[in-house]
Image (spheres, grey):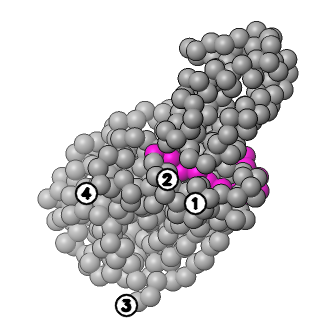
Amino acid sequence: MEHGTGTDLLVESDQDLKMSRILVRYGELALRGKNRGEYEKLLALNIKRMLADFEKVSITRMRGRLIIHCSGEVSEAMDRVCDAFGVHSVSPCFSVPAKIEAIRAEAVRLMGEELSERSSDGSGVTFRIQTRRAEKVFPMNSSEINRDVGSAVLDVYPGLKVKLKNPEIMVEVEVRTSIAHLYTKRLPGPLGLPVTSAGKVVSLLSGGIDSPVASYLAMKRGCEVVLINYHSYPFIGEASKEKVIALARRLVKYQPRIRLHIIPFAEIQKEVKRTAFESYRTVLYRRAMQKIAGRIASIEGALALVTGDCLGQVASQSLENLHCIGSATKYQVLRPLVSYDKTEVIDIARRIGTFDTSILPEPDCCTVFQPRRPVIRGVVAKAEELEANFDLDRLIQEAVEQREIVRLDCQGRESRRMADKS
Ligand code: ATP
Ligand code: MG
């Protein structure tokens, strides 16, 4: 049985048949076990949010598939659905009553579209019809439908050649109880798991190239990402903050709602400069960032932190320093980029649309009082000893209280407010 969340495919009217449809396939692995229903619901919810500005969107869940019904610009809707984590592939889908005459006619029409895209009359072009029957009530079996529809297509385009393996055009037919879906195109989705299915993380977003990509990859594995940025006003200007907000605007394409906490960091940096040796400044900044991120994680109910660290990318990202920095928090620190080359990260940054913003030349807070020679092998005990020389806890408390919270959604809505001091 098909089961619908909105429109029931079993009783669709002719009017419904005129709406555009997008068929969404999702990765099978994630469908195992009893979480499957939850996973499907989250994917449907995320897609619904991504398409919130489309009129009359409804999503029908079927075994192993989602069908999106929408009116409006289908190619724009397809582009958005192709960014929804958990999606394996997407097809614009055309639905007709489950009658062989209707299936034939639609297959011929789709073939006509495919050939006109190729400016071809079909001569020498290879094709096949591939049918699946979800319900076995249809009076013909799959190979009978293939043959019947294939010969109808050949009658109209006699130059075509049937080829079962790797044809140039494949017309897929899915026959259900009262309706049949036909499609010829498959666009790849981003894979992964639906955002929010894995729980919440706090991702440290600088204005650089790496951390937006790390945030994206955390989303890809189903994390709901809460962003956090450290901003060193007045040493660093408003433009750096706006750059980070611009990056969050890029990321909201993949996670329909995002919160960004902007933490004032200058007071901590001043105290580090005043009390610690120069070489330890960067490590101490980073440890303070981890501690604050942990506070935000507990406020948000997040279970892990995410950073854009990449092992050995720069001298300060040594294993010793990652250990020294990571040990400042009790939270797991996920580092999705740990083994990536910079060129690989740049490729992803370009693909996901963060690169052009990341390379804008705005300074990050880490450049404030930057040591000439940062320590390469930070030692935890040493860092802790230096932190005891000033009231770090109080400064962290104040920074958390004075944070600004920016909320963004994929429809372009945005709000900014200072945190409540509770
Ligand atoms: P990125 O390109 O993400 O800035 P990077 O290679 O420049 O990374 P670092 O500047 O050493 O690396 O920072 C390592 C990680 O620390 C960043 O990926 C980010 O997760 C976090 N981080 C650094 N600066 C900030 C900041 N101002 N606000 C939030 N997180 C930061
Ligand atoms: Mg950086």
| Residue at 74%, 55% in the rendered image | 14
Residue 69 part of the magenta-drawn span: yes
The label number, if any, that marks residue 2 in the structure image: 2
Residue ID for mark 3: 422
Label 4: state its secondary structure: strand
Relative horizontal placement of residue 46, taking residue 114 as reference (left or right): left
Query: What amino acid type should be assigned to the residue bearing mark 3?
Result: Ser
Q: Quadrant of residue 204?
A: bottom left
| Residue at 46%, 78% in the rendered image | 403
Query: What amino acid type should be assigned to the residue bearing mark 4?
Result: Gln
Q: Name the front one of labels 3 and 1.
A: 1
Mark 1–mark 2 distance (CA, rounded to whole Å): 8 Å
Report crowding for label 1: few under 14, some 14 to 19, many 20 or more residues within 10 A (C-alpha).
some
Query: What amino acid type should be assigned to the residue bearing mark 1?
Result: Asp
Residue 62: x and y in percent read 49, 51
Query: What amino acid type should be assigned to the residue bearing mark 2?
Result: Glu
The label number, if any, that marks residue 8 in the structure image: 1
Residue range corresponding to the magenta coloring: 64-75
Residue 137: x and y in percent read 52, 41
Lower position in the chain sequence, tag 3 or tag 2: 2
